[in-house]
Image (cartoon, helix red, strand yellow):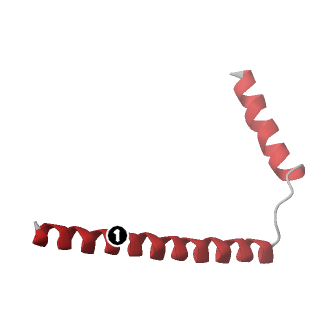
Amino acid sequence: MEKLKNYVLDSIEEIRTRVTWPKFNELQNSAILVLVASLIFAIVIGLIDFGFNNALHWFYREF
């Protein structure tokens, strides 16, 4: 039990003193980048789905 307690206390100490946290504007830029990349990915996947859907509908109508 003592090892677990030391582990938790050491982890808290490391987070408080040794970790460098990003600035708020860096977090905003990263969030915007993730949002834009996610939207682009969703649009590309949607277009691929739309294309396959139309191709399969055409194929099934023809045969």
Which secondary structure lies at badge 1? Answer: helix
Where does residue 29 sit, x and y in percent of width and height?
Answer: 73, 76
What residue is at 46 percent from the left and 76 percent from the top? Answer: 43
What residue is at 74 percent from the left and 71 percent from the top? Answer: 27
> Mark 1: which amino acid?
Asp
Q: In this view, does 12 lie above or below 42?
A: above
Near mark 1 (Cα within 10 A), the count class, few <14, some 14-19 or many ≥20, is few
Q: Which corner quadrant holds the C terminus?
A: bottom left
Q: Which corner quadrant holds the N terminus?
A: top right
Q: How many marks can you see?
A: 1
Is 57 displayed left or right of 1 in the figure? Answer: left
Residue 7, image quadrant: top right
Is 5 displayed left or right of 63 in the figure? Answer: right
What residue is at 19 percent from the left and 73 percent from the top? Answer: 58
Residue 60, image quadrant: bottom left
What residue is at 11 percent from the left and 72 percent from the top? Answer: 61
Where does residue 41 sit, x and y in percent of width and height?
Answer: 51, 70
Is 56 displayed left or right of 42 in the figure? Answer: left
Where does residue 33 sit, x and y in percent of width and height?
Answer: 67, 74
Where does residue 30 sit, x and y in percent of width and height?
Answer: 71, 71
Q: Name the residue under label 1.
A: 49
Q: Is residue 11 above or below residue 52?
A: above
